[in-house]
Image (cartoon, grey):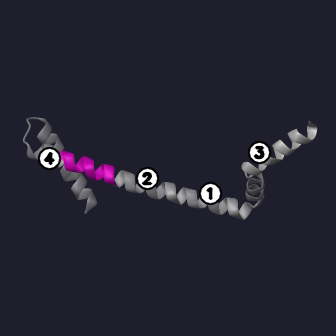
Amino acid sequence: MLEERAERLIREAEQLRLGDYVRFAADRKRRFWDAFLQGVARGLGMMVGFSLLGAAVLFLLQDLAQRNLPGISDFVARVVMLVQLRLK
């Protein structure tokens, strides 16, 4: 009975790939590069996401400014003008 439990525990540990994790955790260089690459991927993802979101907001603001809505269009026109000046 004890042998069966031990064998079952060994099989479950092999399925979890515990050995691979222990080797990964022990290798500082590999952990460093893994964390570095994750950070680079997150940074690029945020950069692309914010760029697309900013472009969509500017597009919507320009559309609102062109519709000549009273009160809103003046404000939106000023915001769009300021943003375009900053981009140059």
Q: Which residue is mark 2?
A: 46
Q: Secondary structure at mark 2?
A: helix
Q: Nearer the viewer, mark 3 or mark 1?
A: 3
Counting from the top left corner in percent of width and height, residue 72 is at 14, 37
Counting from the top left corner in percent of width and height, residue 43 is at 48, 56
Q: Secondary structure at mark 1?
A: helix
Whether residue 67 is situated above or below residue 42 in the rendered picture:
above
Whether residue 82 is situated above or below residue 8 in the rendered picture:
below
As drawn, which residue projects farthest toward the right? 2
Q: In terms of sequence position, does the residue under pointer 3 or pointer 4 come before the other?
A: 3
Q: Which residue is mark 1?
A: 35
Residue name at image x 67 percent, y 60 percent: 32
Q: Which residues are magenta?
A: 52-61
Q: Are marks 1 and 2 in contact (CB under 8 Å)?
A: no
Q: Nearer the viewer, mark 3 or mark 4?
A: 3
- Position of residue 5 in the picture relative to residue 74 (left or right): right
- Amino acid type of the residue that numbered disc 4 sits on in the rendered structure: Asp
Q: Is residue 58 magenta?
A: yes
Q: Are marks 3 and 2 in contact (CB under 8 Å)?
A: no
Q: In terms of sequence position, does the residue under pointer 2 or pointer 4 come before the other?
A: 2
Per the rendering, the mark at residue 63 is 4
- Position of residue 74 in the picture relative to residue 1 (left or right): left
- Amino acid type of the residue that numbered disc 3 sits on in the rendered structure: Glu
Q: In terms of sequence position, does the residue under pointer 1 or pointer 2 come before the other?
A: 1
Q: In terms of sequence position, does the residue under pointer 1 or pointer 4 come before the other?
A: 1
